[in-house]
Amino acid sequence: MPIYEYRCEDCGGTFSLLQKMGTGERETSCPACGSDRVRRLISAPAVGSSAGGAPAVGHACSIGGG
């Protein structure tokens, strides 16, 4: 399940929720003030790697003739 970020239009607070894909703004309320006037924010996706994020030693990119 993805984590969605929201901003409350009443109190201005931002919060994150772990929700099923397809869950809409109408089904979400602000945990601080209880308002249902929330907007989903655009946020960068989290990208993970089991290799720790570093390229393997001795492997070069073959694109561009390098």
Image (tube, rainbow, N blue to C red):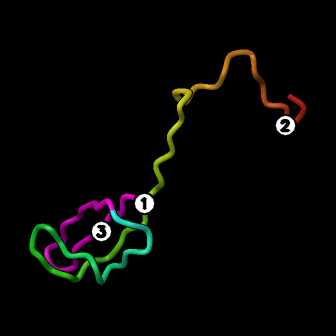
Q: Which callout, 2 or 3, points at the residue further toward the start of the chain?
A: 3
Residue at 23%, 83% in the rendered image: 37
Where residue 52 appears, as percent x and y from the top left, is: 51, 27
Residue 13 tag number: none
What segment carries the magenta color?
Answer: 1-18
Q: Secondary structure at mark 1?
A: loop
22 or 43, nearer to the observer: 22
Q: Which residue is disc 2 drawn over?
A: 63
Q: Secondary structure at mark 2?
A: helix
Residue at 28%, 60% in the rendered image: 16
Q: In the displayed structure, does residue 46 sit left or right of residue 10? A: right
Residue 43 tag number: 1
Q: Is residue 56 magenta?
A: no
Q: What secondary structure predominates along the stretch shown in magenta?
A: strand
Spatial CA distance of label 2 from label 1 is 30 Å
Residue at 36%, 58% in the rendered image: 3
Q: Secondary structure at mark 3?
A: strand
Where residue 15 appears, as percent x and y from the top left, is: 24, 62
Q: Quadrant of residue 33?
A: bottom left
Q: Quadrant of residue 63?
A: top right
Spatial CA distance of label 2 from label 3 is 40 Å
Question: Are there few (<14), some (14-19), or many (20+) residues within 10 Å of tag 3?
Answer: many
Label 2–label 3 contact, CB within 8 A: no
Question: Are there few (<14), some (14-19), or many (20+) residues within 10 Å of tag 1?
Answer: few
Q: Quadrant of residue 8?
A: bottom left
The three-letter amino acid code for the residue at tag 1 is Ser
Residue 6 tag number: 3
Q: Is residue 6 magenta?
A: yes
The three-letter amino acid code for the residue at tag 3 is Tyr
Q: In the displayed structure, does residue 14 sit left or right of residue 4? A: left
Where residue 23 appears, as percent x and y from the top left, is: 37, 74
